[in-house]
Amino acid sequence: MEKDLPYDGPLFDAHSHAADESALKLMVGTGRKFGVERALLILHSPQSSRFRELYPGRFVFAKFFFGNTLLTDDPTGIRNEIASMREQGYSVAKMHFAPSWRDRIPEGAKPIPPVNDGQFDMFFGLLSDFQVPVVIHIADPDTYYATKYSNSEVYGTKESHIGDFEKRLSRSAHLRFQAAHFGAQPELSRLDNLGRMFDTYPNLYVDTGSARWMARELGKDPKRARAFVTRYCRRILFGTDCVARSLEREYYEGRFLTERLLWETNVRGVPLPFVDEDTKNSGGTFINGLSLSRSVLKRIYWENALALYGT
């Protein structure tokens, strides 16, 4: 199937994770079949030197910073950690502020403040000083807020999470943010707000992970989604959010294929090649392609990542 896809240029996967070396080998090999030549690889443990040796020139490495580790009165440690990132092989930071963290906080521990809280000013300021862009997860699908996050007193609301992030964009105006998952706003009802944010904040970029979320929401109105992506194509990076943990080739193939069909083709009603847990009891998710132009595809597939990461 991948040989029949219309775009024949290289792809830069701007959102992927590594958890297992054997799974990473499978993810890289499968990605190559779908044209992925380079990738941003988010690491949760210090393996950049090992992976750099195994895959020279393939990865830009992102270091994962957990929110609660940054809440310190001693700026020296954070400054040294950020200052030494490039020496350690990292050129991008990764942060996670989604509501799911509420379930991971040990009993009795203080909750992580919102992303716009002044306690994080020093950290984001240092990233800006050292010109380190940050990939940031700010919120989750609307379907999550209707189910697992329905208790807003515990998890907050999606509007408040997006609003907190917008305040951070303003407070850290010289720092480049890659908001994961289309800025958490691929839902049709949220595109106008995302467009307003693009127009207001030149430091905002988004990526397209994950495949099921993008296909489910943008495919509901391909014409409108195509116009949106075309208009803001300089601010959108292709990404899969694949996690190199699975040893099942179908896991990677399904996600690469879904996104390429979504962005490149005009297919209609193609079943998602893996289960979408959010729709499995309501008919499933289907792919409706946006059929983007080659010039737009080249930007979101390749050029934007090179420009944002300075590589």
Image: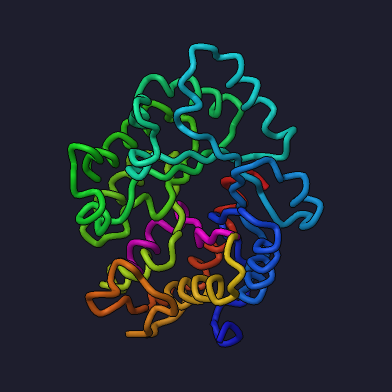
Q: In this view, does 51 lie above or below 284?
A: above
- In the image, taking residue 115 as reference, residue 258 lies left or right, namely right
Q: Is residue 284 above or below residue 102?
A: below
- Occupied quadrant, residue 284: bottom left
Residue 260 in picture, x, y percent from top left: 50, 74
- In the image, taking residue 98 as reference, residue 305 lies left or right, namely right
- In the image, taking residue 140 as reference, residue 69 lies left or right, namely right
- In the image, taking residue 70 as reference, residue 184 lies left or right, namely left
In the rendered image, the quadrant that contains the N terminus is bottom right
Residue 241 in picture, x, y percent from top left: 50, 58
Which residue shows up at 55% across the image and 29% down it? 127
Verify whether residue 162 appears in magenta.
no
Verify whether residue 230 appears in magenta.
yes
Residue pushed farthest right? 53
Can the viewer see residue 191 in this picture? no
Residue 255 in picture, x, y percent from top left: 49, 71
Can the viewer see residue 165 in this picture? yes
Say how the picture is coloured. Answer: rainbow
Q: What stretch is highlighted in magenta?
A: 225-244
Which residue shows up at 43% across the image and 21% down it? 121
Which residue shows up at 29% across the image and 74% down it? 280
In-front residue for pair 172/162? 162
- Occupied quadrant, residue 84: top right
Residue 307 in picture, x, y percent from top left: 59, 48
In-front residue for pair 186/210? 210
